[in-house]
Image (cartoon, rainbow, N blue to C red):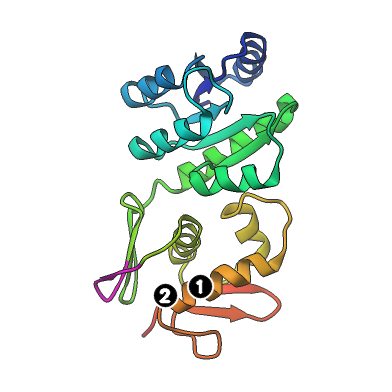
Amino acid sequence: MATVLVVEDDEYVRSAIIQELSRRRHAVRSAGRALDALREITQNPPDAVILDLGLPDLDGSEALKMVRSVSTVPVIVATARDDETEIVRMLEAGADDYLVKPFSGDHLNARLDAVLRRSRAAGGPSVLRAGALTVDLNRREATLEGTPLTLTRREFDLLAYLTARADRVVSRRELLTEVWQQSYGDDQTIDVHLSWLRRKLGESASAPRYLHTVRGVGVMLITPS
């Protein structure tokens, strides 16, 4: 069971989501406006937020930015906007997942369970270390030999995920599922982000120090000896 905040201005949709989540024994609170939701998140932090983008007082994308400035609570964006560019923009802005309306109760609960699992798994150490590499999960900062790394949100998520699993192979499918929150996708997306990360770590695919490709399997972040 989890405490879920539903941020939705349409009373019918809000009621349907609340009913479905309550049926799964979640404790559900709701808000019809972005500012009310922000107040709830800061005063009574939920375990997860389901956020509509078309709110009456503030666009959901702006609300998401404000949420991310005060909280790391998992956020599932639920909206009728199905443009791929918009989906990517929301994920890059800090959403943990994205649902396009209409969706089934089973689909909603499967996505909610997934983000809750990731959030609870992240309840381990807040600072990860591998050799001279340090990743601070709470501050979302990474340093190499004491020098801060300038990383995009996705680069940080990828580096943090691999560092938390240092010295073991992580499959590309796992990266797509857990870092990109996609059940399928193009391996080239992973390759591009790994290339950018390697550059910022001062290494290359042909001369890796931390990020090693395991051909036909995935990627392994190795702690230098």
Residue 117: x percent and y percent? Answer: 54, 42
From where the camera sits, is residue 222 visible? no
Task: Work out whether residue 224 or residue 205 is closer to the camera in this orientation and state it.
Answer: 205
Residue 110: x percent and y percent? Answer: 67, 35
Tell me whether circle 2 and circle 1 mark residues in contact (CB < 8 Å): yes
The three-letter amino acid code for the residue at tag 2 is Lys
Position of the C terminus, as image quadrant, is bottom left
User: Which residue matches tag 1?
Assistant: 196
Q: In the rendered image, which quarter is residue 115 located in?
A: top right
Q: In the rendered image, which quarter is residue 52 located in?
A: top right
**Residue at left offset 49%, top offset 65%:** 162
Residue that extends furthest to the left in the rendered view of this protein? 146
**Residue at left offset 67%, top offset 9%:** 12
Disc 1: CA contacts within 10 A as few (<14), some (14-19) or many (>=20): some
Please give left or right for residue 11 compared with residue 31 in the image.
Answer: right
- Helix, strand or loop at mark 1: helix
Residue 2: x percent and y percent? Answer: 50, 26
User: Which residue matches tag 2?
Assistant: 200
User: What is the spatial separation of the Cα atoms under label 2 and label 1, in whole angstroms?
Assistant: 6 Å
Task: Work out whether residue 84 or residue 158 is closer to the camera in this orientation and state it.
Answer: 84
Residue 92 to residue 73: above or below? below
Q: Is residue 205 magenta?
A: no
Please give left or right for residue 147 compared with residue 61 in the image.
Answer: left
Task: Work out whether residue 65 or residue 77 is closer to the camera in this orientation and state it.
Answer: 65
Start-end of magenta stretch: 143-149
**Residue at left offset 41%, top offset 33%:** 67
Residue 9 to residue 63: above or below? above
The three-letter amino acid code for the residue at tag 1 is Trp
The label on residue 162 is none
